[in-house]
Amino acid sequence: MRFTPFDLVQWQSRYEPTVDYTLADSSCRPVELRDFLDETQVARLVAGAQHYPEVRGTPELRRLVAGWQGCRPEEVVVTVGAAEANSILAGALIGPGDHVVLMEPGYRQVWGLAHNAGAKISVVGLDERNGWRLDVAALESAVRPDTRVIAVTNPNNPAGSVLTAQEMAAVVAVAERNGTWLMVDEVHRGTELDTDEVTTTFWGHYDRLVCVGSLSKAFALPGLRVGWIVATGDLLDELCRRHEYATVSTGLLAMRIAEAALTTPYRDRLLDRNRRLMREGRQLLLRWAEAHPDLVSIVAPTATALGLLRYRAEATSLEVAHALRRRGGVLVAPGAHFGADGHLRVIHSLEPGYVSAALDRVASVLTEGVETGDPPTR
């Protein structure tokens, strides 16, 4: 059976241990638990017996997720990160010969899962010249009467754009017209850079809809591996059965910490802390790009801890990324892994001195030049 690997994660797992700097990740500078857990919460964590947790997640965590997503607690299934959520969702909704429509550049987990399921894929490109906006006419043309799934990531990874209310309504209208399922990855909700308003969820806008979220991005807690799915009806039941097969449940200790992270006032403190870091990081990246117009350009992201750089070199993004890691000791994410060759995705919201040093090395390698056909290893 032909298998399509998850190129981005394979790239990271293979090369992260080999470089001095990694800008290939997608989360804000991770939170230390002591930064937001108080003595009462720590005592609760230490005293709690580590029994098998409820398969769908603790009642308190599902209640808190429901408050974040605008749904009911009984519509939530807590998963091992958004990675498990997307995996079991694809298994439930996508099969051999199904037609799936995706937006690119995009996070390609669902793209790979659809390929592995034997689906037929159509891609709708976001318009870089228009701030990575959705071309609604192109979406309408791509969706057919037999389209099974439209997959959306909002805010977008890697471009950092956010769908407007009009664009969201257009996506829903296209899906509704054809009875198509909407799979919406909302992992980056809460990472807005120009406003403190959280991006509107798709939940509640359509009946054939499922949303995915996690604590990895806006809450800077990727190591917890806590994500969730919001769904209803028969699909919810099937997702629970697939969740039981895949992982049985998320870890109890991780869910207890997640409860604290989503509880007021800790939730607001985490969001404020991470937005501040992301806004500072964006300014750092934009200033660097403005200082090197002969090397790169960028559409300023309006959300996420990410920047999608267009480079000037006449080489593929894999060739450039290999040159950066070999000659510069810096790992970035090649645009090819997002359907955006000619670009590099970088994280900007780590410790500022670390990011600046890494970007200086990127500039040095790009200034020296990248040879096409350069072998990945030496």
Image (cartoon, rainbow, N blue to C red):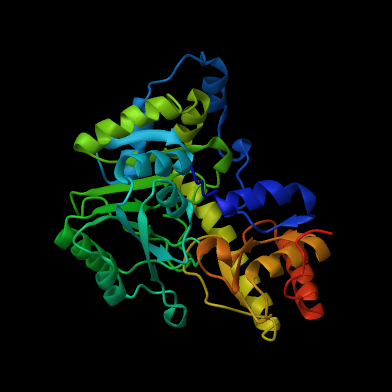
Q: How many marks?
A: 0
Image position of 118 (left or right of 37): left
- Where is residue 43 shown, x and y percent of the image? 56, 21
Q: Quadrant of residue 372?
A: bottom right
Q: Quadrant of the C terminus?
A: bottom right
- Residue visible at 40% across and 26% down? 245
Which residue, as the protein is rendered here, is positioned at the far left?
A: 177
Image position of 211 (left or right of 350): left
Q: Quadrant of residue 65?
A: top left
- Where is residue 159 shown, x and y percent of the image? 49, 67
Image position of 212 (left or right of 27): left
Image position of 167 (left or right of 13): left
- In terms of depth relative to the viewer, which is nearer, 128 or 94? 94
On screen, residue 55 above or below 140: above
On screen, residue 223 above or below 331: above
> Is residue 15 visible to us here?
yes
- Residue visible at 25% across and 42% down? 71
- Where is residue 306 shown, x and y percent of the image? 56, 63
- Residue visible at 38% across and 23% down? 55
- In terms of depth relative to the viewer, which is nearer, 17 or 194? 17
On screen, residue 128 above or below 71: below
> Is residue 264 visible to us here?
no
- Where is residue 138 shown, x and y percent of the image? 31, 74
Which residue, as the protein is rendered here, is positioned at the far front?
A: 1
- In terms of depth relative to the viewer, which is nearer, 155 or 124? 124
On screen, residue 36 above or below 154: above
